Image (spheres, grey):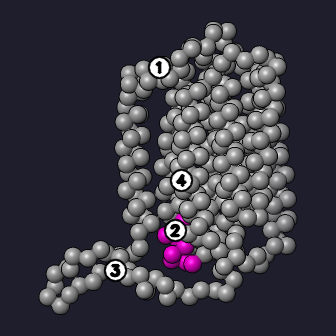
Amino acid sequence: MLTVNFFLAVGAALFCIGIYGLVTSRNAVRVLMSIELLLNAVNLNFLAFSSYVDPVNIRGQLFTIFIIAVAAAEAAIGLAIVLAIYRNRNTIDMENFNLLRW
Amino acid sequence: MNLGEGVRLVSFGILALIVLGGALGVVLAPSMVHAAFLLGLVFVGMSGLYLLLNADFVAAAQILIYVGAVNVLLLFAIMLVNRRIPDAAAGKRGLRNTIAGFVCLFVFGSLVNGVVRVPWPISTETPIANSTLRIGEQFFSYYLLPFEAVSILLLLALVGAIILARREFVPDRTESGDQPLVLPERPRAEMDETPKLPETTGRR
């Protein structure tokens, strides 16, 4: 029997993998990929609740579509920032982005 | 969708395996190109999970936007900033990664604990047949203002990404004081003179 807990567990695992990648990776593009993983985990939670708790007014699906749109905008802006930093600093290592360090 | 319970369970297992294995590959793969393609695999598996949750429109949007747009954008970024990072502090990073892994495992354990303990108010109503129609109705009635705000956000992101990724502004003023009508970019030859390290050709 497929219950809501299965989907929530997969979402939690995906979220934790995304956080691990966000914290440990040094490549800025991989950090952006980890953020996409985090947003996908959130989308899976929204859709699980939309299907199991609110199957008539599927509001979770609406929120998911908003999140997908915001994620697309975030990916475009993030990659543009990565390109700009690469042009100025000649690296995309996260540990070299210390322009605003004290 | 009208699938049997066993079919749903088996396909859920396969899709969850694809998604979690692909996500681990995205985080741990040494090559960035492999990580980007595994990310596409994760997106496809997620859209399969969305289909299991009766969200057909969102599954199609996931394929179109994530696999078709975001993943291609990431691949282009990898192509443009492709260089190997000299791994200086590898030994110090091992301990940090281990600590981060344990923290993430702890977060996962507490999340699953919460998921199992909370009695979710599971609805017994039958899911509606035509979810795309319902999404359209809600978008153009109750959620009209957020919908328009998202469209403005996408427009701003488009313009902002172009402005950020453009080469920097070099004012090229002539003697008479007026600005010549040229594209405000650094010339291409000057861009090519940037110093290149010898290990820049590796793929990472």
Q: Is residue A88 magenta?
A: yes
For mark 1, give the secondary structure. Answer: helix
Q: Kindly indicate the quadrant of the structure image that contains residue A31.
A: bottom right
Residue B17 numbered tag: none
Q: Which residues are magenta?
A: A82-90
Q: Which residue is mark 2?
A: A83
- Left or right of B43, for residue B183: left
Q: In the image, residue B191 lies at what x, y percent?
A: 46, 82
Between circles 1 and 3, the one closer to the viewer is: 1
Between circles 1 and 4, the one closer to the viewer is: 1
Type of residue at label 4?
Answer: Ala
Type of residue at label 1?
Answer: Leu
Q: Which residue is mark 3?
A: B170
Q: Which residue is mark 1?
A: B133
Most frequent secondary structure within the magenta stretch: helix
Q: Are marks 2 and 4 in contact (CB under 8 Å)?
A: no
Q: In the image, residue B127 lies at what x, y percent?
A: 61, 14
Q: Chain of mark 4?
A: A
Image quarter hosting the N terminus of chain B: top right
Residue at (40%, 58%) from the top-left corner?
B160
Q: Is residue B99 magenta?
A: no
For mark 4, give the secondary structure. Answer: helix
- Left or right of A72, for residue B159: left
Residue B129 against residue B185 in the figure, above or below: above
Q: Chain of mark 3?
A: B
